[in-house]
Each structure stands twice: as C-alpha cells, then as structure tokens.
Image (cartoon, rainbow, N blue to C red):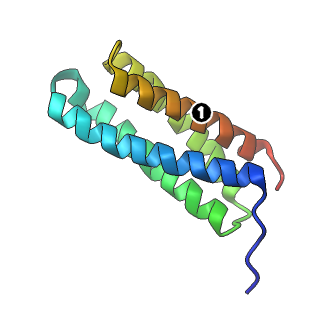
Amino acid sequence: MQIPLINQTVKACIELCKECHAMCESTIQYCLQLGGPHVEASHLRLMRDCAQICQTGTDFMLRGSPLHTLVCGVCAQICLRCAESCEHVGPGDAQMKACADLCRQCAQSCQQMAQARV
C-alpha cells in the first residue's frame, strides 16, 4: 500500500485540526468548571461536535481519503458555529476567545481544503 504524499497545505490543515480538537476538549473542561451559561447543553454539544469533526477531518486527510474535501467542508461550518458560540457564552473571557480564534483559523483552513481538488 502506497501512502499518499501530503503537501504543505494539507499538513497545515491537519495541524490546525489537531490544535482545534485539543483546544475544544480543554475548553469543555474549563466550561464545566465555570458552570452557568458555559454549561448550556447546546454550547457543550457544539464544542464536542467541533472537537470530533476536527479529529475526523485529521483522520481523513492523514489517510488521503478522496472524501476529505467533504469532511473539511463540514468541519469549517461546525468550527465557525463553535467560534460564535464561544464568543456568545464568554465575552471578555480569554479562554473562550482563544478557543473562538483557533476555531476560526481552523475553519478558514478547512474551507480551503474543501474547495481544493487535491
């Protein structure tokens, strides 16, 4: 079995997806400690969705799946929604801002992947 070569754009997206996955997982724990609006079911569900789709996108890109563009398109949408939710739940909160910023970076990279015909 030949392992597909991964170009720099794909590598960058993989790294952002990994970072976003880790950020969402750690921010979920942060939210659980804070309570209040940070633990609203819809917010936590979205953060979990974001973490999981980032992991899935990473897996699809690493194995060179021809369907990675579809997964990356969905990932971009979910990351944007997660960023909006983090900003809404924690305005002025450094952790929530960091999570929102990274989700937006990941969304932008995934959108590029979704539009690419790699």
Q: Is residue 49 visible?
A: no
When the figure is inspected, residue 12 is found, relative to residue 45, above or below; the finding is: below
Within the image, what quadrant is residue 60 found in?
bottom right
Q: Residue at x 75, y 49 (%)?
A: 9
Q: Residue at x 58, y 38 (%)?
A: 106
When the figure is inspected, residue 61 is found, relative to residue 105, above or below; the finding is: below
* Residue situated in front as seen by the camera: 9 or 63: 9
Q: Does residue 48 appear to the left or right of 59 in the view shown?
A: left
Outermost residue on the right side: it is 117
When the figure is inspected, residue 11 is found, relative to residue 31, above or below; the finding is: below
Determine whether the residue tagged by mark 1 lies in a helix, strand or loop: helix
Quarter in which the C terminus is drawn: bottom right
Counting every numbered tag in the picture gives 1
Disc 1 residue type (three-letter): Gln
Badge 1 is on which residue? 105
Q: Residue at x 41, y 19 (%)?
A: 87
Outermost residue on the bottom side: it is 1
Percent across and percent down for residue 116 are: 81, 47
Other residues around mark 1 within 10 Å, as few (<14) / some (14–19) / many (≥20): many
Percent across and percent down for residue 75 are: 57, 44
Q: Does residue 45 appear to the left or right of 61 in the view shown?
A: left
